Amino acid sequence: MVTASAFVLIATALWCSIASAAAHNCSSEASAATIAAQTCQQLSSSLGPSIVQTQSSGSEYSIGADYAWSTFNDEVNFQPSCIVFPTDTQHVQTAMEAIFQNGADYAVQAGGHSGMTGWNTVQNGVLISFINMTSASYDPESDTITLFPGIHWGNATSDLQQYGVAPVGGRIATVGTGLLLGGGISYLSPAEGYAADNYVSLDVVLVNGTLVTATVDNEYADLFKALKGGGNRFGIYPNSSSEALLAALAHFVHDTADPNAVLATTFRTTWENSSTDIELDVILVYNGTEASFNQSFSEFLSIPYTSSALQALSYLDLLNAVTFPDGLGTLFGASALTGVSTSSPTDDYLETFRLYNNFTTAFASSPDIAFTLLDFSPVPQSQIQAGYEKGTNPIVPPLGTGGYFEILFQVTYNQGVTQPSANVEQGRQFWIANAPSTPGLPFFLNEADANQQILATYGGYEFLQQVYAKYDPTKFNVQHTQGPLGL
Ligand SMILES: Cc1cc2nc3c(=O)[nH]c(=O)nc-3n(C[C@H](O)[C@H](O)[C@H](O)COP(=O)(O)OP(=O)(O)OC[C@H]3O[C@@H](n4cnc5c(N)ncnc54)[C@H](O)[C@@H]3O)c2cc1C
Ligand SMILES: *[C@@H]1O[C@H](CO)[C@@H](O)[C@H](O)[C@H]1NC(C)=O
Ligand SMILES: *[C@@H]1O[C@H](CO)[C@@H](O)[C@H](O)[C@H]1NC(C)=O
Ligand SMILES: *[C@@H]1O[C@H](CO)[C@@H](O)[C@H](O)[C@H]1NC(C)=O
Ligand SMILES: *[C@@H]1O[C@H](CO)[C@@H](O)[C@H](O)[C@H]1NC(C)=O
Ligand SMILES: *[C@@H]1O[C@H](CO)[C@@H](O)[C@H](O)[C@H]1NC(C)=O
Ligand SMILES: *[C@@H]1O[C@H](CO)[C@@H](O)[C@H](O)[C@H]1NC(C)=O
Ligand SMILES: *[C@@H]1O[C@H](CO)[C@@H](O)[C@H](O)[C@H]1NC(C)=O
Ligand SMILES: *[C@@H]1O[C@H](CO)[C@@H](O)[C@H](O)[C@H]1NC(C)=O
Ligand SMILES: *[C@@H]1O[C@H](CO)[C@@H](O)[C@H](O)[C@H]1NC(C)=O
């Protein structure tokens, strides 16, 4: 398997933005709706009715409005004033120019897998949907991949397989390119860095509609960097192995220097008849021989497991090995823990798990919840190193202290639940507020709660603030679309 080294991404605006904190009132809602309607009308005449669709005028409007993975972002809760379905960069420019000049609220949606309510759709505003920009191509001369923003990682990987190359993209086939904007953690990351560390060139539409191409060494090098962040075994362990497994995880991310070894671990709790059941899913991946696999993961292999399947898989098979149900409302929360040497205690890991279990016990009888996850994504030293070598990113995790885990706490609601319930939300926020985290480690934007101050945990926070101020001096994006806090 060859790893290609490039992405070209069409990003609308600078993604960094903020959730509007102002409480809405009727007249400002009304004026936002009026401004959006005017903008939509203008765009409909310039781009035409098949590219710009409203709820009453377009046959693809509902497909676009219901495309989001978390149903909390579906048409039940958000009815964009219109949806723009660009098919080329010029359409994106035209849309952003009108949005900017009219002062309209807006949102952008790529693969739709955001866990943040309101980030990839909008009420009383314009939604730009990339459903119709989904190509992936390969240029052997420069050994670069070009991706359009609407493609999903599974499709990109299968489209490019014929050339013997693969993108450093998501671990689940259905996720989209928005992954890059939070850095992106891939099965290829220990060797290649964050997904975004592999950018070669980015086509970026600024908030005012101006198109710029950013590379590592042109006049938009600051923007280029800012947009970086920001043999297989699938085993299932019983809950009685949980403490040993947590220790093995902490040791692995501290000690493993081999970029060919990577893992993904999910503690999954399901709800049924007022009781819960937990399962520990571990994916261990080694790029190499079975003997090396056995050696790299020996601690995991010594822990009692319920079932396991050792097999040789292609990279594409790996992305398709696990699927996530669509059509359920989902919310995320993040923390980060450093790796632990075998001689040190793993108290923070145990406390993280205890708080997770406390949540599941407290809400075991909730009729709303379908399942919860506690998920560990490794960021080994080799991945951090690769990022530094490829020009650095704004996340800049500390070097020299060993690797760490990005931790995701996920709550997924049952089908038909259109709003999270208040008491469950309180419990979820309790986990977010109390889960231990190692000072100085960056949290993972892609798997965080909308109200967490993720950018402030980055080593390059001040850098991001400066680049944002330079490319969006009136803070249009912060005021008119939802996104990360802190700019
Ligand atoms: C099942 C599942 C598995 C996941 N696995 C991984 C994983 O392995 N590794 C990982 O790093 N993350 C993973 N994530 C997290 C995922 O990367 C984030 O949810 C990411 O934001 C999804 O990108 P998207 O394009 O699918 O979503 P979208 O909701 O379309 O986009 C996400 C955010 O980026 C913005 N955005 C997207 N494209 C653009 C653009 N071109 N210009 C401006 N703004 C844009 C959107 O407005 C939105 O706020 C996973 C999430 C899920 C639900
Ligand atoms: C409502 O919003 C409008 C426009 O932003 C503002 O002028 C007005 O003062 C607000 N009214 C109240 C009661 O907050
Ligand atoms: C967008 O894609 C859909 C099908 O995927 C197609 O029906 C529609 O014509 C496309 N729209 C444009 C403007 O190309
Ligand atoms: C993307 O991949 C899925 C399977 O993972 C497939 O069903 C779908 O048709 C593909 N879409 C495109 C546009 O190739
Ligand atoms: C799983 O094990 C932990 C102790 O490690 C315990 O606190 C928790 O209640 C167990 N969960 C279930 C569902 O049995
Ligand atoms: C839950 O209750 C239903 C209906 O009584 C039953 O069919 C099902 O087996 C129960 N599930 C569990 C895990 O006990
Ligand atoms: C896997 O290992 C081979 C041989 O050591 C190497 O050439 C290749 O780059 C590796 N692939 C990844 C994705 O690390
Ligand atoms: C790897 O370990 C398994 C047991 O977990 C064993 O069956 C297998 O023979 C080992 N393979 C090699 C090449 O050592
Ligand atoms: C357990 O969770 C509940 C609900 O969030 C919370 O009120 C309580 O303080 C938690 N207890 C502990 C010991 O963490
Ligand atoms: C768009 O914004 C950029 C960054 O602020 C600025 O340099 C450029 O002049 C603006 N373009 C127009 C047409 O106003």
Image: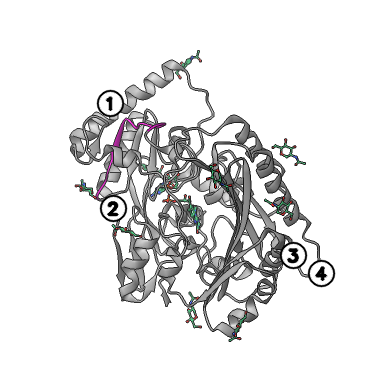
Label pair 4/3, CB-CB below 8 angstroms = no
Q: Which residue is mark 3?
A: 340
Q: Who comes first in sequence, dot 2 or dot 4?
A: 2
Discs 1/2, front: 2
Q: Amino acid at mark 2?
A: Met
Q: Who comes first in sequence, dot 3 or dot 1?
A: 1
Instruction: Residue 367 in the image: state x and y as whole percent.
Output: 56, 36
Discs 3/1, front: 3
Which region of the structure is painted magenta? 76-87
Cα gap from disc 3 to disc 1, whole angstroms: 57 Å
Q: How many other residues sit within 10 Å of disc 2, few (<14), some (14-19) or many (≥20)?
A: some
Q: Which residue is mark 1?
A: 38
Q: Which residue is mark 4?
A: 343
Q: Who comes first in sequence, dot 4 or dot 1?
A: 1
Q: Is mark 1 within 8 Å of ligand 2?
A: no
Cα gap from disc 2 to disc 4, whole angstroms: 51 Å
Cα gap from disc 2 to disc 3, whole angstroms: 44 Å
Q: How many other residues sit within 10 Å of disc 1, few (<14), some (14-19) or many (≥20)?
A: some
Query: Residue at left 37%, top 28%?
Result: 124
Instruction: Residue 83 in the image: state x and y as whole percent.
Output: 30, 37
Element under disc 2: loop
Discs 2/4, front: 4
User: Quadrant location of residue 380?
Assistant: bottom right
Query: Residue at left 57%, top 70%?
Result: 308
Element under disc 1: helix
Q: Who comes first in sequence, dot 2 or dot 3?
A: 2
Discs 2/3, front: 3
Nearer-the-camera pick, 133 or 280: 280
Q: Which residue is mark 2?
A: 133
Q: How many other residues sit within 10 Å of disc 4, few (<14), some (14-19) or many (≥20)?
A: few
Which quarter of the figure is the C terminus placed in? top right
